[in-house]
Amino acid sequence: MKNLISSVLVLVLCISCNPEAKKAANDVLKAVQQTEEKSTHQLSDFENISAELLKKTSLTDEELLEAFPKELMGFSVDRVNAIPYMQQVVGLFGNRKIVLSIADAAGKNNSLVTTFLGFYSYVPLGTDQNKLIKVERNGIKTISETMYNETEMKFIYDDRFYISVEAKAMNPDELWEALDLTVFTRYQEMNK
């Protein structure tokens, strides 16, 4: 970025005699400054969230299991398990039609949130078979991946919980519409 600014400054000096060129160079400088300011704000958001999560204590496996939804999108939970030492629970609903994973990103797991937010800022292009979509839905940043008639949507809930929900035969919009966020309120209550 510094090289870019230096190059722009040299360009400005070279064309400072021409008033039209001077105006164009000033416009370019303003655009560069705005881009730098946006990047600085974005990094500080990552740092703020990361610092806040480091102050918090991760929930235990028992707490994560206790708050896990018993029903999701009209399907009862078939099975739910905690992944030892990962502060994560995974559950199956409706005979594996839906898979829900919830990870607590507090404490040492704070990289889950910062990695998600970093990836959200640059979601690579998908392929014909694998489609990646980033959309902010109801103020929540989501990343969806659709592949072979299955959709996986990832998002951060309450600036702490990394949630991944997979569903068969649904596109991202249908999945979001069917997902009732109130099933996660017990996790929100535990976010101290």
Image (spheres, rainbow, N blue to C red):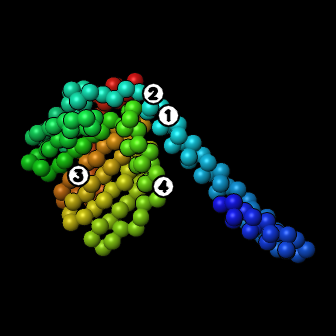
Residue 164 rendering spot, x and y as whole percentages: 28, 47
Residue 106 placement: quadrant: top left
The kind of secondary structure element at disc 3 is strand
Q: Residue at image x 30%, y 28%?
A: 59
Between disc 3 and disc 4, the foreground one is 4
Foreground pick, 157 / 63: 63
Horizontal side of residue 31 vs 50, given as left or right: right
Mark 4 sits on what residue?
A: 121
Residue 99 rendering spot, x and y as whole percentages: 19, 47
Question: Could you give the CA–CA distance between mark 3 and mark 4, rounded to whole angstroms?
Answer: 22 Å
Give whichever of discs 4 and 2 has the lower sequence position: 2
Mark 3 sits on what residue?
A: 166
Between disc 3 and disc 1, the foreground one is 1
Contact between labelled residues 1 and 3, with CB atoms less than 8 Å apart: no
Give whichever of discs 3 and 1 has the lower sequence position: 1
Q: In the rendering, which numbered label is found on residue 55?
A: 2
**Label 4 Cα crowd, 10 Å radius (few <14 / some 14-19 / many 20+):** few
Mark 1 sits on what residue?
A: 51
Give whichever of discs 1 and 4 has the lower sequence position: 1
Q: Residue at image x 88%, y 75%?
A: 18
Contact between labelled residues 1 and 2, with CB atoms less than 8 Å apart: yes
Residue 30 placement: quadrant: bottom right
Question: Could you give the CA–CA distance between mark 3 and mark 2, rounded to whole angstroms?
Answer: 30 Å
Question: Could you give the CA–CA distance between mark 3 and mark 1, rounded to whole angstroms?
Answer: 30 Å
